[in-house]
Structure formats: structure tokens, C-alpha cells
Image (cartoon, grey):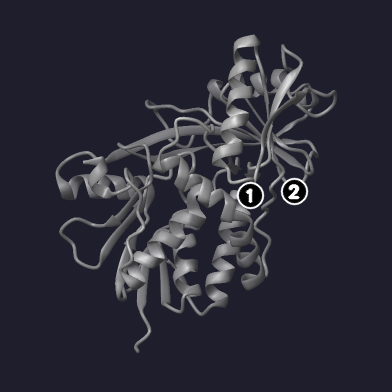
Amino acid sequence: MATAEVTVLGAGIFGLAIAFACARSGARVRVIEATRIGAGSSGGVVGALAPHVPEQWNPKKQFQLGSLLMAEAFWADVAAVGGADPGFARLGRLQPIADAAALALAQGRAKGAEALWQGRAEWRVEPATDGWGPFSPTGQVIRDTLTARLSPRQGSAALVAAIRALGGDVVIGAASLQGKVIHATGVAGLEELSAALDRPVGGAVKGQAAVLAFDARNQPQIFADGLHIVPHGNGTVAIGSTSENQWNDPGATDAQLEVMIGRARAICPALAQAPVIERWAGLRPRARSRAPMLGPWPGRPDHYVANGGFKIGFGMAPKVAQVMADLVLTGRDGIPEGFRVEDSL
């Protein structure tokens, strides 16, 4: 039987993860990136792989759970094949609890996690402690053991190394297409698809984030007041991000980021004196459905779409890679309800 040929357009997290899964299944793979690896939101700094709350369960939450549960094995395989560290660690997450009503809600969600998370992770309420961690008005915090971190740039580089180790090509610039084509081109891809279908299927949302020099590499993440505070293995802490629907410069940081840095220091007093060593801004692709957009490109045989990762692309990547590789290579359709291209029309 002839070896399947696959071209992936876009070297962001979806494109690279799918290319790796296809190559791992024996396909001959070529990734074509117009500018640079992680040119869009996949070149950011935060890298929070965090679950939705364990209640009001739906196909999106089930898909994300499956992806987070397979993430450790997926990234270990990437590292073993390519020899590069993606910066993955499953160290959990802390969230402060504001008041008695929030405490009761958190306790109810702990019971939901027992039923929904298959005994493979916990969501529990426990006393807050001094040192690393968020200030909590009730003295109680939520700790979940499912949340993980990944260095976006290390993860992308590790995938490139693994794809090449499996005989795949990763090309920057123009190159010929071969076989079936997967469009994983982020914001530009949403614009292209919207034009082709003559209706909007999604758009860009700007985010700003920062990196602080503070070594908390073995500590859990913090999520509070809408902010992710993520310790990384290189002795830094990333914080993010804003969500902006209007902007003048997609790559510029501004006063909104400085406000966010101040909020992060208030949430986590350990960061009060930590210097800022990087500021980042970029555009994230959000589908109209707010779920990843996966499946055949309508009306274009042998062309497929993998887009709309928005804030959860890194957490969704292992499962997205599996589903898209199955669809493209074997025809098996495991796309969940709400994730199809048609769901964003």
C-alpha cells in the first residue's frame, strides 16, 4: 500500500501536532509555514493547559478532558522522538475562593469532578497556605490536579524536531503541496475560509501577556480574576492574558498589560518584586462557535481545516491531532458535536 502524503499549512500548535500525529502513523508529511514557527498565538508565553469546570457537561468539555488526560503521554512521546524538551509538567492549579457562595459552588464542583474526571484527577477544596499561592478572602482555595503547563515555544520546537526525526519536512516559505492538505493557519486561515464561504466563520482576538523572572518551577499554576499565572521550568512565571476585540497594533503592548501585571502581583504576593523580562502581544483565532473548528473544507475535496484554538489550543492539541490524523488518513470521523466547520457558519 502506498504511503499517505499529507501537507499541513501552518506551523502553529494545531498544525505541528497534527503533522506529528500523521507522521507517527506512517504518513509522509510536509509542514509549510509562511513566516516562522509559532508566528501567531502559538508563539506566545503563557502555556496554561487548564480544564473547564466539572459541571454542565457537554461534548466540548468531554473532548478537552480527553485531551488533557492524554497530554502527558503525548508530550513525552514528542520529547522521546525528537529529543527536545517541550516544557510540559502536570503540576495542577490553585484558585482563590471569594466568599461563602463561591465556597459552596466549589464544593459542588468537587463532587462533579469525582463523577466526570474518571478518577484520574481531582478538584478539591483545601486551606490556603503561605508562600506561593493566591490571596484568598475565605482562607480556602480550589486545587485541581488536571491542569498542566507547556512552554509554547519549547513545545513548538519539540514538535518540529519530532516531525523531522520521523522523516517529515518543515519548510519556511513557499513549497509544493503533496497529497491531502490541512489548513491550520490561524487568524489568516479564518479570514481565507470566511472569504471562500462568503460568510464569517470567526476572527481574531488580541491578547497581551508578560514574563516575570521568578523561579517557581515546581509550583502549581494560579487562576484568579480571569488571569493565568503559570510557572515554567526555566525559572520564569508567565501571566496572561487580555482579550481585546479592538486594537490599533496587533503586536504592540500597552497600558492594559501594565494593569494586568499589577493585578497579578496583588493576586500572588510572591511576585511583588519580580522583574518583567518580556512583554508579548498577538492575535488568537476564535471561531464563531468558540470551539475548535475541525473537518473537511466544504466544497474542496482532500482539503481540511483545523483552526480556532483561541485560548485552549495547547490543551486541545493532543486530541485534535489524533482526531484529524484519523480523519485524514483513515476516514474515521471522531469530530464531536459543535466542532465542525459547518457549526461556525
Residue 215 vertical placement versus 86 (above, below): above
Q: Which is nearer the eye, 82 or 32?
A: 82
Residue 154 lies, in percent from the top left, at 63, 55
Q: Which is nearer the eye, 314 or 265?
A: 314
Residue 98 vertical placement versus 320 (above, below): above
Secondary structure under the numbered disc 2 in the rendered image = loop
Tell me if 211 is positioned left or right of 333 in this view.
Answer: right
Disc 2 to disc 1, C-alpha distance: 8 Å
Q: Amino acid at mark 2?
A: Gly
Residue 334 vertical placement versus 142 (above, below): below
Query: Residue sitting at 31 percent across and 50 percent down?
Result: 189
Tell me if 331 is positioned left or right of 68 in this view.
Answer: left
Q: Amino acid at mark 1?
A: Ser
The residue under label 2 is: 233
* Displayed quadrant of residue 82: bottom right
Compare marks 2 and 1 and give the one earlier in the sequence. 1
Q: Name the outermost residue toward the right.
A: 130
The residue under label 1 is: 151
Image quarter (top left, top right, bottom left or bottom right) of the C terminus: top left
Secondary structure under the numbered disc 1 in the rendered image = loop
Q: Which is nearer the eye, 75 or 264?
A: 75
Q: Which is nearer the eye, 100 or 73?
A: 100
Can residue 343 be seen at all in this image of the molecule?
yes
Q: Are marks 2 and 1 in contact (CB under 8 Å)?
A: yes
* Displayed quadrant of residue 172: bottom left
Query: Residue sitting at 40 percent across and 33 percent down?
Result: 205
Query: Residue sitting at 65 percent across and 43 percent down?
Result: 121
How would you rate the neighbour count of disc 1 (Cα within 10 Å): few for under 14, some for 14-19, many for 20 or more?
A: many
Tell me if 88 is positioned left or right of 105 in this view.
Answer: right
Residue 321 lies, in percent from the top left, at 45, 60
